[in-house]
């Protein structure tokens, strides 16, 4: 069963119009503290994947730009936490809720929480600052974050790419059937008229 691709395609077309820099910036904001809570990363990534299926952007470029942006946003959050500035991010009630969940994840799993947090929608931007504040070392952070980001962009990018490809393929098949039926109806109608005039 194919996933509906219209919404991701619209998102992807808007993102693609900005170019590489715009894509990197968008996903940096999606992963950064605070701003990441208001951007639907999964929809954006599937939208970017759907854009690659239309041929307007290569699949490899889509993954590269998105991954760079995610790593920038995660790095910003991590170093904010290392500097002890993460407490400034707790003024928003919405962020406090997600921060509490992220803190439990970090306390329970340490650096592994960085990997797991990438796949938990909406509160993953709260994980890097808390990982930095908890004393997770840079090499531990990036050892968990880089594979998580690469897997995340590949998974949802491929989903959007596949879903749109199936949708386009089925649309082409449907149009082909319609054109064939119309052609046959036209040919049949012309044949009937020819026979009618022939008898006359």
Image (cartoon, grey):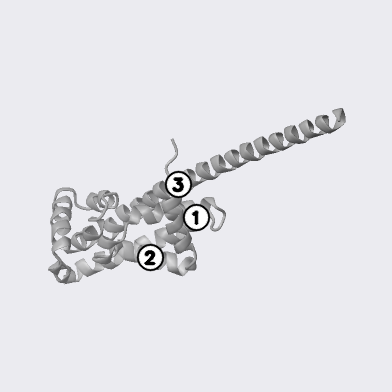
Q: Residue shown at 49%/67% (left/top)?
A: 19
**Which residue was labeled with disc 3?**
158
What label sits on residue 128 in the rendered view?
none
Farthest residue, direction front = 200
- Which of the pair 171/21 is nearer the observer? 171
Q: Earlier in the sequence, mark 2 or mark 1?
A: 2
**Which residue was labeled with disc 2?**
26
Structural crowding at the residue carrying mark 3, measured as other residues with C-alpha within 10 Å and reported as few (<14), some (14–19) or many (≥20) = many
**Which residue was labeled with disc 1?**
51
Q: Residue shown at 48%/60% (left/top)?
A: 13
Q: Are marks 2 and 1 in contact (CB under 8 Å)?
A: no
Q: Quadrant of the C terminus?
A: top right
Q: Quadrant of the N terminus?
A: top left
Percent position (x, y) of residue 3?
42, 42
Structural crowding at the residue carrying mark 2, measured as other residues with C-alpha within 10 Å and reported as few (<14), some (14–19) or many (≥20) = many
State the separation of the CA atoms marked 1 and 3. Answer: 11 Å
State the separation of the CA atoms marked 3 and 2. Answer: 19 Å
Structural crowding at the residue carrying mark 1, measured as other residues with C-alpha within 10 Å and reported as few (<14), some (14–19) or many (≥20) = many
> Against 50, is 196 above or below?
above
Q: Earlier in the sequence, mark 1 or mark 3?
A: 1
Looking at the rendered structure, the secondary structure element under dot 1 is helix
Looking at the rendered structure, the secondary structure element under dot 3 is helix
Percent position (x, y) of residue 176?
63, 39
Looking at the rendered structure, the secondary structure element under dot 2 is helix
């Amino acid at each position: 069963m194919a996933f509906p691709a219209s919404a991701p395609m619209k998102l992807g077309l808007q993102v693609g119009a900005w170019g590489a820099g715009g894509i990197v910036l968008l996903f940096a904001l999606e992963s950064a503290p605070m701003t990441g809570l208001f951007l639907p990363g999964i929809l954006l990534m599937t939208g970017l994947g759907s854009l690659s299926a239309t041929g307007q952007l290569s699949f490899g470029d889509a993954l590269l730009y998105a991954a760079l942006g995610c790593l920038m946003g995660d790095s910003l959050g991590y170093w904010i936490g290392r500097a002890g500035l993460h407490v400034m991010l707790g003024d928003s009630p919405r962020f406090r809720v997600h921060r509490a969940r992220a803190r439990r994840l970090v306390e329970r799993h340490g650096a592994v929480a960085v990997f797991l947090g990438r796949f938990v929608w909406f509160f993953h931007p709260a994980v890097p600052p808390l990982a930095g504040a908890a004393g997770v070392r840079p090499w531990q952070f990036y050892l968990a974050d880089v594979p998580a980001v690469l897997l995340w962009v590949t998974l949802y990018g491929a989903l959007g790419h596949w879903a749109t490809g199936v949708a386009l393929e089925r649309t082409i098949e449907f149009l082909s059937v319609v054109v064939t039926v119309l052609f046959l109806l036209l040919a049949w109608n012309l044949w009937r008229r020819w026979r009618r005039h022939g008898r006359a």
